């Protein structure tokens, strides 16, 4: 290759790179507070966790969530929190790891209930360290030894105890109903209406529902009317299309309509992107961003 042609090729490549970087940095902030998670942009941001945060910020995201935060080394948690504060990215949920396949909230077993409370106490410290305002709880399994009504009572009693733990720290527990058909057979809470019923009974501002639209679509759909009916107890949303649990546009949910309604309702909380990427590599990651641009109410 001639030197002149080589130099012009390199220059053109450099220009394209910097133009792409400038375009990314100029991406408008999304209307809703969509929250990606670590690993979602690892090909586009191969420099590690902090690189992913910078990449997401450059592409308009202003929220984040991380179910695995409690398992990360202390220095990693601190570095993540420091960069998120600098970038003005809001931390969403961290998980209390209360046990998807365990008997806990529905049960009367004292050891199981104590374990839940201990896990919540531990997670409070993680949430404080990374400035997380929300803590995910999953309700565990149905306990066939007790009538359904008694299981509800057990859950309500335990959540009232847990609420006293998180209240002084300004952290909101969000109970996540999980579908039984595809992902979590035997789950105690399956629908947003069950979560609403329990949180109404707990009657505490630090105990709310995490409305996962993917799970509810499988559990029965009716996403917009149920959002409206349960709105007073919904503090957090999560998205994922069905079938497949990938980004909007890969399944049957009309996310443009759902998000438009959510935005019009005045909801200004976080929408966690708790799903995988349909495509692979950089192309698949950019497709995720494009998918959210396509359904964002401000686009």
Image (tube, grey):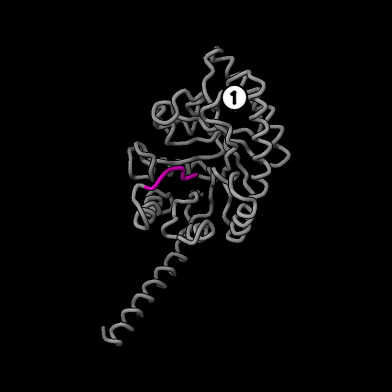
SS at mark 1 in the image: loop
Q: Is residue 298 left or right of residue 70?
A: left
Magenta stretch mostly in which secondary structure? loop
Q: Would you identify the image quadrant in which residue 198 lies?
A: top right
> Looking at the picture, how far across and down is residue 10, in whole percent?
35, 79
| Furthest-left residue in this view | 1
> Looking at the picture, how far across and down is residue 188, in whole percent?
51, 23
Q: Is residue 239 left or right of residue 254?
A: right
Query: Which residue lies at the image location 44% right of the left edge and 56% below the top edge?
Result: 42
Q: Choose between 121 and 219: the one closer to the eye.
A: 121
Q: Choose between 186 and 203: the one closer to the eye.
A: 186
> Looking at the picture, how far across and down is residue 106, in whole percent?
58, 21
Query: Which residue lies at the image location 64% right of the left edge and 55% below the top edge?
Result: 75
Question: Taking the image as drawn, is residue 293 in sight?
Answer: yes
Name above or below for residue 10 compared with residue 108: below
Answer few, some or many: residues within 10 Å of disc 1's Cα (few below 14, many 20 plus, some between 14 and 19).
many
Q: Is residue 207 left or right of residue 176?
A: right
Question: Taking the image as drawn, is residue 232 in sight?
Answer: no
Query: Which residue lies at the image location 40% right of the left edge and 32% below the top edge?
Result: 217
- Which residue is denoted by mark 1 in the rendering? 105
Specify whether residue 109 is painted magenta: no
Name above or below for residue 44 compared with residue 294: below
Q: The N terminus appears in which quarter of the rendering?
A: bottom left
Q: Choose between 108 and 243: the one closer to the eye.
A: 108
> Looking at the picture, how far across and down is residue 67, in whole percent?
54, 43
Q: Which residues are magenta?
A: 272-277
Q: Would you identify the image quadrant in which residue 124 lies?
A: top right
Q: The C terminus appears in which quarter of the rendering?
A: bottom left
Q: Choose between 110 and 16: the one closer to the eye.
A: 110
Q: Is residue 130 left or right of residue 226?
A: right
């Amino acid at each position: 290759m001639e030197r002149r042609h080589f130099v012009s090729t390199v220059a053109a490549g450099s220009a394209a790179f910097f133009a792409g970087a400038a375009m990314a940095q100029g991406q408008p902030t999304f209307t809703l507070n969509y929250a990606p998670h670590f690993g979602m942009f690892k090909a586009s941001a191969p420099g590690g966790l902090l690189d992913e945060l910078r990449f997401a910020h450059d592409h308009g995201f202003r929220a984040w969530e991380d179910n695995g935060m409690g398992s990360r080394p202390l220095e990693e948690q601190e570095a993540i929190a420091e960069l998120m504060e600098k970038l003005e990215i809001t931390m969403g949920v961290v998980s209390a790891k209360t046990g998807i396949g365990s008997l806990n909230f529905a049960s009367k077993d004292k050891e199981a209930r104590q374990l839940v409370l201990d896990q919540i106490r531990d997670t409070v410290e993680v949430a404080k360290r990374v400035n997380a305002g929300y803590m995910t709880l999953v309700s565990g399994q149905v306990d066939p030894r007790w009538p359904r009504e008694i299981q509800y009572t057990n859950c309500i009693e335990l959540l009232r105890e847990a609420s006293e733990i998180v209240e002084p720290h300004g952290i909101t527990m969000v109970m996540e109903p999980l579908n039984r058909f595809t992902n979590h057979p035997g789950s105690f809470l399956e629908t947003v209406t069950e979560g609403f019923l329990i949180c109404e009974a707990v009657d505490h501002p630090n105990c709310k529902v995490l409305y996962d639209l993917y799970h509810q679509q499988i559990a029965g759909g009716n996403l917009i009317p149920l959002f409206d009916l349960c709105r007073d107890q919904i503090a957090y949303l999560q998205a994922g299309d069905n079938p497949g649990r990938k980004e909007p546009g890969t399944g049957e949910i009309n996310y443009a309509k759902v998000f438009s309604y959510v935005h019009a309702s005045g909801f200004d909380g976080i929408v966690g992107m708790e799903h995988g990427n349909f495509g692979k590599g950089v192309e698949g990651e950019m497709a995720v961003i494009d998918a959210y641009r396509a359904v964002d109410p401000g686009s």
